[in-house]
Image: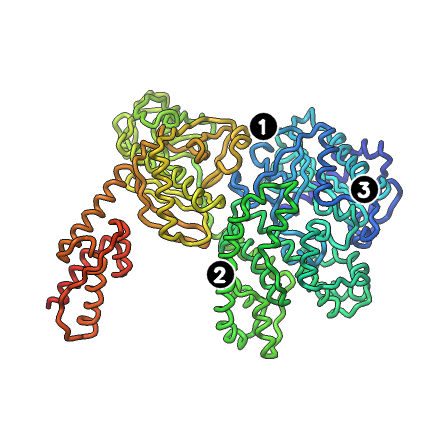
């Protein structure tokens, strides 16, 4: 993939040479704007009067709207969206609901980082119709490259609202002049900014695999919006024209209410009730004179854009007339308070939308946020109830996002568990730090210790100061942590090689229509050695965690079935004796198909049951379905208790007993998303214009290409055989279903009988007798006691067979399959 920076530079150079071809120059001229060139950064820009400096804060003197905003309409956070929505709807735009911040519909992104992410890749490519056209959307987004800036610059966020203005049209209907005028009117009529206060700065943009030129709107040093005229797809070889042209305007909503009110920081206007609450708790008294002098230059402290942050602090301290140490201490304390407010909102949104803190992947950044907030609370010894902040955010945002109040119980449970992990890490940390302090503590060591042990650098600095040792924490520490984690993830990505299937039509998958269909005739479209492509087939390819079918093509054994895009390939045991365009017969093993189908049905039922029992944060992380058993990996923040496992299993079997129909329908992607929401994407993104929706009415709905029966009763029985935590935020449920579940229970019953016979005792006394056996074996065999060996225990248990076996595995510290051998060995040792 080409470098984004170079793409932007090349596009900008090309567009700047002929601005009237790429930008809405005619509209700008009709509105009275004239072209200028900045003497500082050399960029071109438009204003009503001739200017020699552009609108960028670094060129024009920082933020100059603090306590002196030119906007005559003073809008709060909620009111700013309503004003934007009202004006744009009158211009023909439809308002749609936001998408979740976890981008489950995309393979290439974990988080939604901009409103256009909602529509990439399928709407932008023209493959799928948008939910409305044109449209506006209040899209909450997550970005973690600015964590160290949060709280300091007054304008940075890890979670922010992007007010999106979008259109997806063919070239002949693409009207950048209208799009510009519509947004321009919001600033003039909505915010009531005088036209001579606006700076329009032509630029370029790239992201999410697309690129285009853009117009940025500035006023008094603050960028208010960036309207991108997206026209290209970014490929390895260069840029390719999109089939349709796209309007991608993203306006940082936090900046709109901040600018209109002219408050000291955007945090004061984004979550005002939280700021008031935190000021009261922390007893921070804001030095208004200091802030008035500092804030115009706060944008200079953007770590992403500064080469020497220490020098920048010194430069700002001279401008505001404060000693640099005093300035940093005051600003950093205030920044810590604002960070707690911002991070609590980010965690509310992300956890409510189904993300979980973790030590890997996208959830790693959530752990960074929460621990950063908790470390600030510890550092300044503030008595902050973090959960009450989360509730207050949900309450304040209810007019815009009522859904954030619906999952508060789940959010609180997750944060409680995560805080417990943090406290445990702190306790462990103090024991480790004493050894660390003897070393040379530099940036690399701080990063290594945070990544391997989860120890915050602030804690190391605090403990080191007690021993009169100085530790310097890099200002961009958390950015570097995030970057390290991204590199670690990339090393483990699987490399794939694709076969050349150009001009091969997609395979008609007959198994989607009838899971019991076992035979068909099809036309050979392509042969690649032992791989055969037909125009249609009943054979299911390995996908979605379900193993492939076995069978024969014209009598030659199928050993594998593979899917590449929409083409299905049959791998044969020997070279085929037929050729392209021949008609052949396909026949698959029905018994294998039915076993796989039952285990796939069971996965959907268990997923729905887990969500019902554990909460709305449950999503399928991955799954596996074989003929003998299956496993379902679900997103959850802690190991499951025995009673939770039983409740999930009971719920699943109740769904089976209710004999609910399992419906499968091929639906347009945008229709499916509108009707069922983004929760349909379980276990990964699914490509294409159409989705197959598998629905257990009123219980579970998923986009799925696997084989499914027509009723939950087909499954007959589900038995969870084991639960284990396979990562920090994923729990695995191993299970058997149908006849395999019944066989499993019969095997357990036989095992109980065999153990009872060996110990010559009724099964109700089995637990007590095994505990007695193990205790005497340890005393007599291990410790050499000369007591007489005799078994007498008759402690009665009322547990069922499964619970008895589980208890015995705990007593003997072995697995179920080894119980008989272990008991037999102990008896043999004791009778010697």
Is residue 60 visible in the rendered structure shown here?
A: no
Give the farthest residue toward the right.
49
**SS at mark 1 in the image:** loop
Rate crowding at label 1 as few (under 14), some (14 to 19) or many (20 or more) other CA atoms within 10 Å. some
The label number, if any, that marks residue 129 in the structure image: 1
Q: CA distance from mark 3 to mark 2?
A: 46 Å
Q: CA distance from mark 1 to mark 2?
A: 45 Å
Rendered residue at 77%/47% (across/down): 259
The label number, if any, that marks residue 73 in the structure image: 3
Residue that carries the numbered disc 2 in the rendered image? 421
**SS at mark 3 in the image:** loop
Q: CA distance from mark 3 to mark 1?
A: 36 Å
Can you give x and y, in whole percent of width and height, for residue 704 in the image? 43, 34
Say which of 630 and 59 sits in front.
630
Earlier in the chain: of badge 1 and badge 2, it is 1
Rendered residue at 60%/33% (across/down): 124
Marks 1/2 in contact by CB < 8 Å: the verdict is: no
């Amino acid at each position: 993939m080409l470098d984004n920076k170079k793409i932007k530079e090349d596009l900008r150079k090309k567009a700047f040479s002929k601005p009237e071809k790429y930008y809405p120059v005619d509209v700008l001229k009709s509105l009275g704007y004239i072209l200028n060139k900045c003497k500082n950064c050399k960029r071109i820009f438009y204003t009503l009067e001739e200017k020699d400096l552009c609108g960028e804060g670094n060129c024009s003197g920082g933020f100059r709207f603090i306590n002196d905003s030119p906007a005559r309409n003073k809008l709060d956070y909620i009111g700013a969206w309503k004003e934007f929505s009202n004006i744009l709807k009158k211009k023909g735009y439809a308002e749609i609901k936001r998408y979740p911040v976890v981008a489950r519909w995309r393979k290439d992104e974990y988080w939604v980082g901009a409103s256009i992410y909602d529509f990439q890749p399928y709407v932008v490519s023209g493959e799928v119709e948008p939910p409305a056209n044109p449209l506006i959307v209040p899209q909450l987004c997550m970005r973690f490259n600015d964590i160290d800036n949060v709280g300091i610059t007054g304008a940075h966020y890890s979670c922010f609202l992007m007010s999106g203005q979008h259109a997806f049209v063919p070239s002949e209907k693409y009207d950048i002049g209208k799009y510009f005028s519509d947004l321009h009117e919001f600033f003039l009529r909505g915010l009531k900014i005088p036209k001579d206060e606006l700076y329009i700065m032509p630029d370029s943009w790239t992201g999410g695999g697309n690129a285009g030129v853009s117009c940025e709107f500035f006023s008094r040093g603050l960028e208010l919006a960036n309207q991108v005229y997206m026209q290209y797809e970014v490929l390895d070889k260069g840029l390719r024209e999109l089939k349709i042209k796209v309007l991608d305007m993203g306006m940082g909503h936090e900046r709109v209410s901040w600018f209109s009110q002219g408050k000291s920081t955007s945090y004061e206007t984004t979550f005002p009730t939280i700021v008031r609450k935190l000021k009261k708790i922390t007893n921070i008294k804001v030095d208004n004179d200091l802030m008035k002098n500092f804030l115009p230059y706060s944008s200079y402290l953007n770590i992403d854009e500064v080469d020497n942050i220490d020098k920048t602090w010194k430069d700002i301290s001279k401008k505001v007339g404060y000693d640099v140490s005093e300035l940093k201490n005051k600003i950093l304390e205030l920044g810590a308070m604002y960070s707690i407010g911002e991070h609590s909102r980010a965690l509310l949104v992300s956890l409510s939308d189904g993300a979980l803190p973790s030590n890997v992947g996208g959830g790693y950044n959530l752990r960074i946020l929460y621990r950063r907030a908790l470390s600030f609370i510890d550092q300044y010894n503030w008595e902050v109830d973090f959960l009450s902040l989360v509730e207050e955010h949900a309450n304040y945002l209810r007019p815009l996002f009522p859904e954030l109040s619906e999952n508060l119980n789940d959010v609180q449970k997750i944060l409680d568990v995560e805080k417990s992990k943090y406290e445990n890490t702190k306790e462990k940390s103090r024991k480790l730090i004493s050894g660390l302090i003897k070393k040379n503590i530099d940036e690399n060591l701080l990063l290594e210790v945070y990544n391997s042990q989860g120890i915050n650098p602030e804690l190391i600095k605090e403990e080191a100061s007690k021993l009169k040792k100085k530790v310097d924490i890099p200002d961009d520490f958390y950015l570097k942590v995030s970057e390290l984690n991204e590199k670690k993830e990339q090393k483990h990505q699987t490399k794939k090689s694709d076969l050349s299937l150009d001009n091969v039509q997609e395979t008609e998958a007959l198994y989607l229509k009838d899971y019991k269909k076992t035979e068909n005739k099809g036309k050979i479209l392509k042969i690649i050695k032992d791989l055969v492509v037909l125009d249609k087939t009943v054979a299911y390819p390995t996908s979605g965690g379900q193993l492939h079918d076995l069978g024969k093509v014209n009598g030659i054994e199928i050993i594998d079935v593979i899917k590449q895009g929409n083409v299905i390939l049959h791998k044969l045991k020997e070279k085929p004796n037929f050729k392209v365009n021949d008609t052949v017969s396909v026949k698959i093993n029905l018994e294998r198909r039915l076993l796989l189908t039952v285990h796939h049905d069971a996965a959907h039922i268990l997923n729905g049951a887990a969500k019902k029992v554990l909460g709305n944060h449950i999503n399928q992380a991955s799954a596996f379905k074989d003929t003998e058993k299956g496993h379902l990996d679900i997103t959850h923040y802690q190991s499951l208790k025995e009673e939770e496992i039983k409740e999930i299993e009971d719920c699943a079997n109740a769904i089976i007993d209710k004999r609910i129909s399992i419906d499968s329908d091929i639906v347009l992607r945008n229709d499916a998303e509108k009707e069922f929401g983004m929760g349909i994407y379980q276990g990964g993104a699914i490509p294409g214009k159409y989705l197959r929706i598998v629905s257990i009415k009123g219980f579970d709905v998923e986009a799925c290409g696997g084989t499914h029966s027509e009723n939950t009763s087909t499954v007959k029985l589900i038995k969870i055989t084991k639960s284990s935590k396979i990562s920090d935020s994923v729990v695995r449920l191993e299970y058997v279903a149908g006849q395999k579940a019944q066989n499993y229970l019969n095997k357990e019953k036989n095992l109980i009988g065999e153990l009872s016979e060996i110990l010559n005792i009724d099964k109700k006394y089995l637990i007590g007798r095994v505990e007695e056996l193990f205790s005497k074996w340890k005393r007599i065999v291990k410790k050499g006691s000369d007591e007489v060996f005799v078994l007498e225990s008759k402690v009665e248990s009322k547990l069922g067979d499964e619970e008895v076996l589980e208890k015995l595995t705990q007593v003997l510290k072995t697995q179920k399959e080894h119980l008989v051998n272990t008991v037999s060995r102990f008896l043999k040792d004791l009778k010697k």
